[in-house]
Image (tube, rainbow, N blue to C red):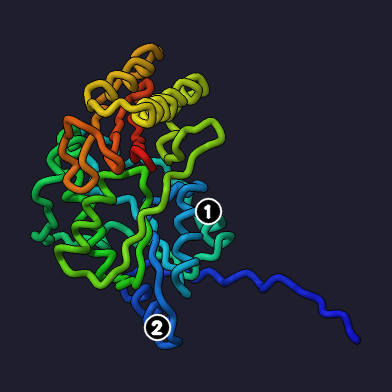
Amino acid sequence: MPTTVFREPPPRALRRASSIAEARGAIAEARARGARVGFVPTMGFLHEGHLHLVDEARRRADFVVMSIFVNPLQFGPNEDFSRYPRDESGDVAKAASRGVDLLFTPLVDEMYASQRVVSVVADGPDRRWEGAVRPGHFAGVLTVVTKLFNIVQPDVAVFGQKDYQQATLVRALVRDLDFPIELVVAPTVREPDGVAMSSRNSYLSEQERVRARVLSSSLRAVAAAFASGETSADGLAAVGRALIDAEPSVSVDYLAVVDPDRLEPVERAVRGSVVLLAARVGKTRLLDNVVLGG
């Protein structure tokens, strides 16, 4: 009886599109074949966290679209849009290696007409936390996500938990504007030392990168305190702040225990409450969070 030899399937061919028309055409071809479309929107400078989102999309869809677009609308007047890290050739290689079918990389002029007058603005959860520190940021995020959803029209879209407030607002966008999309929020991917993967980690010096460990350490301490019976939001926040305050060159913008849906501060934490953290390590601003009891 002949021996069966198993071979891995050939790598999927990566198709690229820089115009909306090209992207829609490629997606229409996939749909004509009966494919379920998954979508992973990014701003590029890809790392393993982004690629885990691709893995999640691949599990739920037949044809995976990734967008890379550094969105100028979500940068404030004191934030350097031009300084945001970019690596086009590296991003293409990483997307191809992970099985992305279509990489959509539009220029700003393709996404935003000069006479644009319409934006998508939230009402509520966008005003606190990142919204308070970065006015207008979430209007920029929700506007570009709405445009991308309209272009790609995915069956499933995957976002990361690290940007918890963003994911919460996108979930509200899908619900309130009746997008027929399954929204998946995938767990934060971390480095072996616990630091949440982020494109902004590239801004850190070697010494700052070591100090950044305190963010995840503080969240673990808060989660442990909650598991041990502490439910006071002030008490939990104090546990986390004590660790960060002891670390040189790291300062807290906010550390708060909030309701997971409206992101309002709570007095008492319950299972499912979220601890939001934003801190500056040197000049670099990093985000992290933990869901209590998770």
Element at label 2: helix
Which amino acid lies under the numbered mark 2 shown in the image of this protein? Arg
Q: Is residue 215 visible?
A: no
Q: Residues within 10 Å of mark 1 (few under 14, many from 20)?
A: few
Q: Which mark is residue 89?
A: 1
Give the image location of residue 81, x and y in percent. Answer: 29, 41
Q: Residues within 10 Å of mark 2 (few under 14, many from 20)?
A: some
Which amino acid lies under the numbered mark 1 shown in the image of this protein? Ser
N-terminal label among 2 and 1: 2
Left or right, 15 with reference to 237: right
Residue at 33% across, 50% down: 70
| Residue furthest right in the image | 1
Q: Is residue 97 above or below residue 247?
A: below
Callout 2 touching callout 1 (CB < 8 Å): no
Residue at 39% across, 56% down: 68
Element at label 1: helix
Q: Is residue 95 above or below residue 17?
A: above
Q: Is residue 253 visible?
A: yes
**Mark 2–mark 1 distance (CA, rounded to whole Å):** 28 Å
Q: Is residue 153 above or below residue 213?
A: below
Quadrant containing the C terminus in the rendered view: top left
Disc 2 versus disc 1: nearer the observer:
2
Q: Quadrant of residue 293?
A: top left
Q: Which mark is residue 31?
A: 2
Residue at 44% across, 80% down: 35
Q: Nearer the viewer, residue 248 or 215?
A: 215
Give the image location of residue 45, x and y in percent. Answer: 45, 47
Left or right, 108 with reference to 134: right
Q: Quadrant of residue 196?
A: top left
